[in-house]
Image (tube, rainbow, N blue to C red):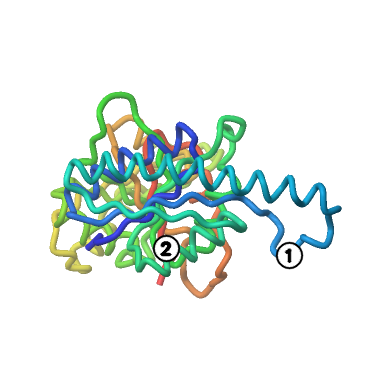
Amino acid sequence: MINKILWASDGSTDSLDALEYVEDIANRCKAQIVGLYVIPDYFEVDMKDQFPKQEYDLIAKWIKETESRESDRLNNIAREFEAKGYSFKTRISQGVPHLQIIQAAEEENSDLIVLGKGRAQEKLLLGATALKVIRRSPIPVMVARKKPGPIKIENVLVPTDLYNIASRDLLFTAGLAKDLDLNVTSLNVVEIGNKKYPPEVVERLRGNSYNNLTQKVAEAKLGIKVNTVVKTGKNAFKGIISYASENDIDLIFMNTYGGGEFRREEFIGSVAERVVQEAPCPVITVKPE
């Protein structure tokens, strides 16, 4: 199902952590890897005429030096991977990073984009480039956060609502689960906010949701075993993060937003954004159909 992976590298520790996940998935899926470095140009128009010639020459010199340095770095990584039997292609481009990443993924017919969460100063927030790629990418995007210890992708969590069970995230997960022999859990979080419901009411809400979730997963006929779990929580993203942390989840799959009638090309829901930002493991986001 995953035949080609685009790894977007910015030279940070995060992106090297992401590369470890790329290697694991490529090994198990026999996928090709494309390593990309974007020389950042945050202006979407030609700014050559906006600088004095001397300053522009300095910028041009920096670009040339950066291209040479990053090309050498990527080529060294490619040689290491090729020595281990992988197909590893390198690309250097210049432009607005998130646009170049998405363009490269489309040109390479990639099935998955993988990138780090963000540079050190962005640790408390989802990096701007990662967020923009998630918002605009038509293909699944993995934002990698390495867990302590060796790389392991076995236990996968798919948060879901009760109105969109056979959505793109679960369907994508089902296909990948067959290739990678994954343990898949579909989680529904019953949001109770700050309301202090009697315990019996909370349990009834949870029980009703569990019955609905189990029935709808069965009706979806995904072709894999899916464990169904319903938890109650103050809000959805905290329930998802809590479950992932407490149950040794290695990877989370989720839609960028809930779907339904609401559609926006550059939208990411608050739940998805908070999960990507705070999850203890990598998260793959997909746009709903």
Q: Amino acid at mark 2?
A: Ala
Q: Amino acid at mark 1?
A: Asp
Q: Residue visible at 54% across and 48% down?
A: 67
- Tell me if mark 1 has few (under 14), some (14-19) or many (20+) residues whose alpha carbon lies within 10 angstroms of its own: few
Name the foreground residue: 215 vs 265.
265
Above or below for 45 versus 7: below
Q: Residue visible at 68% across and 54% down?
A: 42
Q: Residue visible at 37% across and 37% down?
A: 281
Q: CA distance from mark 1 to mark 2?
A: 23 Å
Residue lying at the far bottom of the rendered structure: 261
Residue assigned mark 1 = 46
Q: Position of residue 95 (x, y in %)?
A: 61, 58
In the displayed structure image, the side of residue 282 where residue 256 appears, left or right: right
Q: Secondary structure at mark 2?
A: helix
Q: Position of residue 262 (x, y in %)?
A: 54, 71
Q: Secondary structure at mark 1?
A: loop
